[in-house]
């Protein structure tokens, strides 16, 4: 089933994926740190989208908002936005606007003490792409060190701008159509995908890793086979890299595919190591946007 533009047909796979997203986000919630900034989190303004799409997107986004550990989040969705309220350090709000050409998502974090206003505005062909992207969007919005200039604000594009098959993404139904050579991700020279759900990634560091591919609810899920390779941590000192290998954490990818089967677009979950001397200080999962292009 293609998901072109706003004409999204909600099916059980979409709802199941949404439920999984919410379960994951709920499981990682933690209490805000003492002295955290307070945020009044209001409902998103919604126009021209179905109740199912509205519920899926807004519930996912607000659960991702609650993941922001540096803030104390207050759920004020039943109330109208009050930007002049002095009860909170920040106000979170936004909008979802649908048309035949796509869905525009706008997220806003407004300071109540000054004119600071952080805004992210993007247009998507379908709701699944928003769900795939929304955790990163929320994280970037609340991380005050992130420059949001790459998130260009604009109106919904004309239909002709979305006509290219390279800009339309859909669920993956058959792994074997992916067989061939892919590239495009920083740190990876190429990925050779074989029939039967197996692949080899040749890293820029001069080593290779084996990958396993499967389809889950229309998404291509890629995981590394076995344990991590020492050369995967080539940016770390040898003593730290050895300890990173012992952690056993390996990367994973989640993709949709372009309608011409030439581009995989999605996110990569990887490990970020911070160290002091020969000791690992922290090892956290990070999510990055990635695209693979078929040669």
Image (spheres, grey):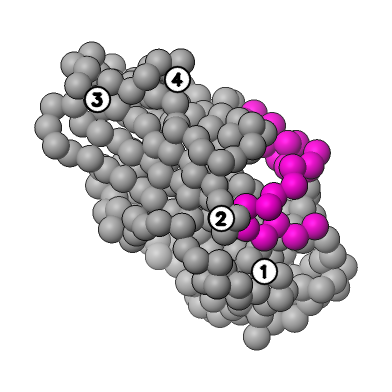
Figure quadrant of the C terminus: bottom right
Q: Is 253 or 208 nearer to us in this picture?
A: 253
- Image marks 1 and 2: residues in contact by CB distance under 8 Å: no
Q: Give the alpha-carbon distance from disc 4 to disc 3, as whole Å.
A: 14 Å
Q: Give the alpha-carbon distance from disc 1 to disc 2, as whole Å.
A: 16 Å
Q: Is residue 140 above or below residue 62?
A: below
Q: Is residue 141 visible?
A: yes
Which sits earlier in the primary sequence, circle 1 or circle 3? 3
Residue lying at the far left in this picture: please name it.
Answer: 114
Which sits earlier in the primary sequence, circle 1 or circle 2? 2
Query: Which of label 1 and label 4 is nearer to you?
Result: 4
Quickly name the residue at label 2: 102
Magenta part of the chain: 1-25
Q: Is residue 235 above or below residue 194?
A: above
18 drawn magenta: yes
Tag 3's secondary structure?
loop
Residue 129 percent across, percent down from the top left: 59, 52
Q: Is 200 or 148 nearer to us in this picture?
A: 148
Tag 4's secondary structure?
loop
Quickly name the residue at label 3: 83
Residue found at x 33% / y 38%:
108
Q: Give the alpha-carbon distance from disc 1 to disc 4, as whole Å.
A: 35 Å
Using the image, tell me which numbered label, if any, was put on residue 77. Answer: 4
Q: Is residue 293 above or below residue 35?
A: below
Residue 53 percent across, percent down from the top left: 63, 38
Q: Quadrant of residue 266?
A: bottom right
Residue found at x 56% / y 80%:
189
Q: Give the alpha-carbon distance from disc 1 to disc 3, as whole Å.
A: 40 Å
Q: Is residue 66 above or below residue 270?
A: above
């Amino acid at each position: 089933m293609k998901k072109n533009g706003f004409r999204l047909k909600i099916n059980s796979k979409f709802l199941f994926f949404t439920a999984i997203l919410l379960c994951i986000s709920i499981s990682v919630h933690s209490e805000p740190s003492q002295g955290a900034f307070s945020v009044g989190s209001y409902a998103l303004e919604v126009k021209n989208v179905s109740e199912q799409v509205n519920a899926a997107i807004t519930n996912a986004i607000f659960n991702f908002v609650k993941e922001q550990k540096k803030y104390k989040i207050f759920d004020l969705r039943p109330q109208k936005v009050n930007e002049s309220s002095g009860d909170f350090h920040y106000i979170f709000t936004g909008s979802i606007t649908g048309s035949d050409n796509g869905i525009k998502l706008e997220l806003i974090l407004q300071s109540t003490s000054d004119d600071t206003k952080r805004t992210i505005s993007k247009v998507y062909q379908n709701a699944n792409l928003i769900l795939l992207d929304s955790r990163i969007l929320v994280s970037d919005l609340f991380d005050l060190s992130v420059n949001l200039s790459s998130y260009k604000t604009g109106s919904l594009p004309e239909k002709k701008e979305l006509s290219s098959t390279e800009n339309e993404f859909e669920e993956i139904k058959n792994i074997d159509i992916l067989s061939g050579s892919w590239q495009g991700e920083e740190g990876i020279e190429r990925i050779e995908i074989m029939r039967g759900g197996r692949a080899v990634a040749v890293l820029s560091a001069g080593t290779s890793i084996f990958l396993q591919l499967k389809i889950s609810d229309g998404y291509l899920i890629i995981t590394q086979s076995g344990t991590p390779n020492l050369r995967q941590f080539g940016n770390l000192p040898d003593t730290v890299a050895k300890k990173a290998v012992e952690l056993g954490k390996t990367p994973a990818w989640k993709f949709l595919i372009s309608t011409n089967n030439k581009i995989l677009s999605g996110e990569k979950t990887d490990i970020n190591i911070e160290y002091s001397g020969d000791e690992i200080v922290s090892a956290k999962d990070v999510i990055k946007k990635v695209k693979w292009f078929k040669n």
